[in-house]
Image (spheres, rainbow, N blue to C red):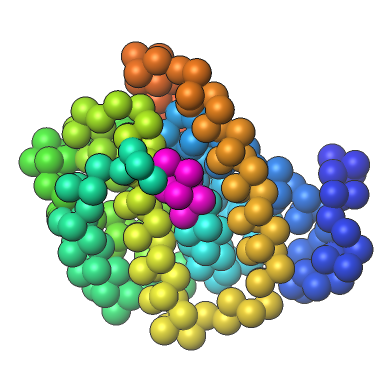
């Protein structure tokens, strides 16, 4: 791992926030690349994986806001690369719900101890994957946007929840990834704006965010090449495997604290 620290130029390391080492920054860049690669190729999983790494390396107060900006950049790049495949008919209702959900979440969001943040993420994603949201929720874009956007103010990574709604649309693999990326771009954009209004200082984290967004875009580009070579059936199988692995990881994290 020490060799990875060399990936971070000394000039950048000197601009890192207090308490974040060059070695930790290198680990975050690798996680951002891997997370975007996973999401671009399999449709889900990368955001939660990156959140798990960030939860170890970042201060709790910065975890959700910084993760939100990085995910905004990653999903924007993915949506732009697959722009022609976005199912635009599914977006308006989701946008309305996302606006309402972020507004309500921003009004009640509070600082939570690290163990509660980690446990909340684990339980939420486990519920959304294993137990499944009710069918009426999966078929309602505005409600999916509202509930997921409310929860993202607390837990950060609600991709599995949104994926449940997108999966119900039965889209081809490129359209699935593109549409979810567009929805997550909207959601993370609103969340970042809300945290800005609440007074979070993004300035000290600017270089960290730029580096992680760049690493994420590289991961998206590589993941798209894998997606292009998959069949729709293969994509659905890979998505199911990714969801199962994600659930297993979160169960373990929840049990070990």
Looking at the rendered image, the quarter that the C terminus falls into is: top right
Count of numbered marks: 0
Q: Position of residue 223 (x, y in %)?
A: 56, 32
Residue at image position (51%, 68%) is 65
In front of the other: 107 or 95: 95
**Rendered image quadrant of residue 165:** top left
Q: Is residue 78 placed above or below 238 in the rendered structure?
A: below
Residue at image position (83%, 66%) is 12
| Magenta stretch: dominant secondary structure | helix
Looking at the rendered image, the quarter that the N terminus falls into is: top right
Magenta residues? 76-82
Q: Position of residue 11 (x, y in %)?
A: 88, 68
Q: Is residue 255 placed above or below 192 in the rendered structure?
A: above
Is residue 80 part of the magenta span, yes or no? yes
Residue at image position (40%, 56%) is 185
Q: Position of residue 7 (x, y in %)?
A: 85, 49
Residue at image position (12%, 47%) is 140
In front of the other: 67 or 7: 7
28 displayed left or right of 13: left
Q: Position of residue 202 (x, y in %)?
A: 59, 77
**Rendered image quadrant of residue 173:** top left
Is residue 57 part of the magenta span, yes or no? no
């Amino acid at each position: 791992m020490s060799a990875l620290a060399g990936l971070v130029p000394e000039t950048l390391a000197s601009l890192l926030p207090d308490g974040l080492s060059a070695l930790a920054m290198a680990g975050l860049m690798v996680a951002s690349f891997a997370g975007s690669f996973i999401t671009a190729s399999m449709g889900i999983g990368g955001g939660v994986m990156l959140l798990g790494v960030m939860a170890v390396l970042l201060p709790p107060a910065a975890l959700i806001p910084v993760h939100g900006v990085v995910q905004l950049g990653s999903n924007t790049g993915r949506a732009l690369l697959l722009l022609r495949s976005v199912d635009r008919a599914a977006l308006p209702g989701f946008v309305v719900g996302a606006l309402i959900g972020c507004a309500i979440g921003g009004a009640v969001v509070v600082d939570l101890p690290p163990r509660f943040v980690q446990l909340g993420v684990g339980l939420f994603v486990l519920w959304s994957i294993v137990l499944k949201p009710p069918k009426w929720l999966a078929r309602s874009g505005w409600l999916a946007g509202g509930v997921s956007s409310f929860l993202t103010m607390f837990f950060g990574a609600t991709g599995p929840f949104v994926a449940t709604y997108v999966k119900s649309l039965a889209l081809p693999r490129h359209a699935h990834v593109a549409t979810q990326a567009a929805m997550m771009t909207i959601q993370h954009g609103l969340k970042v704006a809300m945290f800005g209004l609440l007074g979070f200082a993004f300035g000290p984290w600017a270089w960290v965010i730029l580096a992680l967004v760049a690493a994420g875009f590289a991961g998206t580009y590589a993941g798209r090449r894998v997606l292009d070579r998959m069949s729709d059936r293969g994509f659905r199988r890979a998505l199911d495997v990714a969801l199962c692995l994600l659930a297993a990881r979160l169960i373990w994290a929840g049990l070990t604290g």
